[in-house]
Amino acid sequence: MGHAISLLNYHIGVLQLEPADFSKLDDAVRAVLVKNKIHLRPGCKERLYLPRKELGRGLHSVEFKSEHMLLQLLDCLEKHKDTSTRRAAILKVENNNKTHLSLIKNFLKIKYGLEEEVTKKKLEEAQLANLYNEIKSRKLH
């Protein structure tokens, strides 16, 4: 599993992947876990992604990881656009093409209902709150 995350770390922001693609990758990972009897299908999928200290399984969600990485990449490009012509050019192309990278902040604001500026810490809190809301809204039987 560590190898898969390493590959993912390398390709996020390089390949033109959309949010649905990351969700499908999470589905594929869960399918492998079910196939190998590591996770049961009726089990709570949200609990897979909760930290172990909060009684979760501590698995990294591809979807959440991609949101973090794209946010950090965009922040880095924006921070250094005045001192690096290469980063400024990359940012310009991304903005002109309206890629998921260029729209990530607005996407996250809408997805998680964030009012203020999206930061790494705010995103982590929103993702965790989203998992808990999904668990609470789940019907039992």
Image (spheres, rainbow, N blue to C red):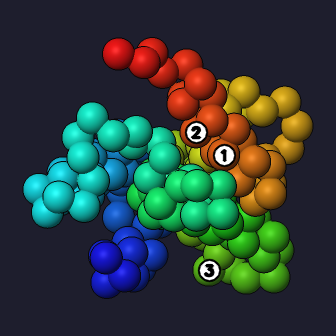
Locate residue 15 relative to residue 12 in the image: left or right. left
Q: Which residue is mark 3?
A: 86
Q: Nearer the viewer, residue 127 or 11?
A: 127
- Choose mark 1 or mark 3, whichever is in front: 1
Taking the spot 40% from the left edge, 39% from the top edge, the residue there is 44
131 over 113 or under it: above or below: below
76 over 132 or under it: above or below: below
Q: Tell how many labels.
A: 3
Residue 136 position by quadrant: top right
Locate residue 55 relative to residue 30 in the image: left or right. right
Q: Which residue is mark 1?
A: 128
Q: Name the kind of residue labelled 1 in the image.
A: Leu
User: Which image quarter holds the C terminus?
Assistant: top left
Q: Name the kind of residue labelled 2 in the image.
A: Leu
Taking the spot 78% from the left edge, 33% from the top edge, the residue there is 114
Q: Nearer the viewer, residue 65 or 116?
A: 65
- How far from the left and from the top, in percent, is residue 71? 65, 58
Determine the CA span between mark 1 and mark 3.
35 Å
Closer to the chain start, of discs 1 and 3, is 3
Q: Secondary structure at mark 3?
A: helix
Residue 119 position by quadrant: bottom right
Q: Name the kind of residue labelled 3 in the image.
A: Arg
Q: Which residue is mark 2?
A: 131
